[in-house]
Amino acid sequence: MTGLQRVQLYLSTEHGCGYLPGNAARNAYVDPEFNMSPWRYELLVQRGFRRSGGYVYRPHCANCRLCIPARIVAADFTPNRSQRRCLQRNADVELHIVDELSDEHYALYRRYLAARHPGEGMDADNREAFHGFLECNWGDTQFWEFRAAGRLLAVAVVDTLGNALSAVYTFYDPDQPARSLGTYAVLRQVQYAREIALAHVYLGYWVPQSRKMDYKKNFNALELLGETGWTPAPAVVRSVEP
């Protein structure tokens, strides 16, 4: 890895997989003492790493390789019919980009977790964990607010890399399912990447057997990271799906 020859990785202990219930998961973490920077992080993202707060990791499970890094080639992307309808349904939405998380964001985040992860402990009132999960003191992170008539509908946490955007996390109003706000947030990020001539939008991991993560294959111009590097998604999808 050019510029990353001395990166030390540490393995976590095994824990329950958040994507595939019943599976054991383990991550490889970059040494937290490593002098991380946006350009170093971009090199790591290109190799399948993500961040949680300021911690940079990638899955390193003993018996599973189903967390597959995914990115959209911005210049080649064309929304399909469903995605065009999503854009139309949200024609009243305005985008505001801010640099800090707010109490309003936190309230929406708690509502989102209560609806998406009830009874899992993730919806507990823990403001420190909220900031620790989403913020990063070495990166270029922005918080994209999506509003309709002033009402906050969704927040996308977005890292700007040298030649890409990285979609860190999105949370949204659980009472607005018809808007498909998660998909809408990705579409707006791809639009923005095209406008400023960035090459990619990194989506994190596509997990083909996870209902929560399988939606990512619906975006065209998708590339997935395999043993031979980044490959157009259709060929990779056929090789991993039953």
Image: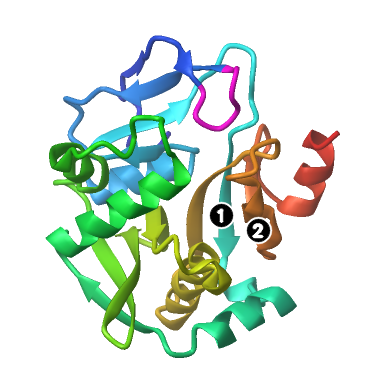
**Which structural element holds mark 2?**
strand
Q: Residue under circle 1? A: 71
**Residue 212 at what x, y percent from top left?**
58, 45
**Mark 1 and mark 2: span between their CA atoms?**
6 Å
Instruction: Locate residue 93: give its quadrant.
Output: bottom left
Comparing 178 with 62, the one in front is 178
Crowd around label 1: few <14 · some 14–19 · many ≥20 (10 Å) = many
Comparing 194 with 20, the one in front is 20
Judge whether residue 242 can be spotted in this image: yes
Q: Which mark is residue 223?
A: none
**Which residue corresponds to the image point at 39% horizontal and 64% vertical from the top-left?**
173
**Residue 48 at what x, y percent from top left?**
49, 38
Q: Is residue 21 magenta?
A: yes
Instruction: Tally the numbered discs.
Output: 2
**Residue 171 at what x, y percent from top left?**
38, 57
Mark 1 or 2, nearer chain start: 1
**Residue 190 at what x, y percent from top left?**
50, 71
Name which residue type carries label 2.
Leu
| Magenta-drawn segment | 17-23
Q: Decide: marks 1, 2 in contact (CB < 8 A)?
A: yes
Magenta stretch secondary structure, dominant: loop
**Which residue corresponds to the image point at 64% horizontal and 75% vertical from the top-left?**
83
Q: Residue under circle 2? A: 222
Q: Quadrant of the C terminus?
A: top right
**Which residue corresponds to the image point at 43% horizontal and 49% vertical from the top-left?**
115
Crowd around label 2: few <14 · some 14–19 · many ≥20 (10 Å) = many
Instruction: Locate residue 98: give its quadrant.
Output: bottom left
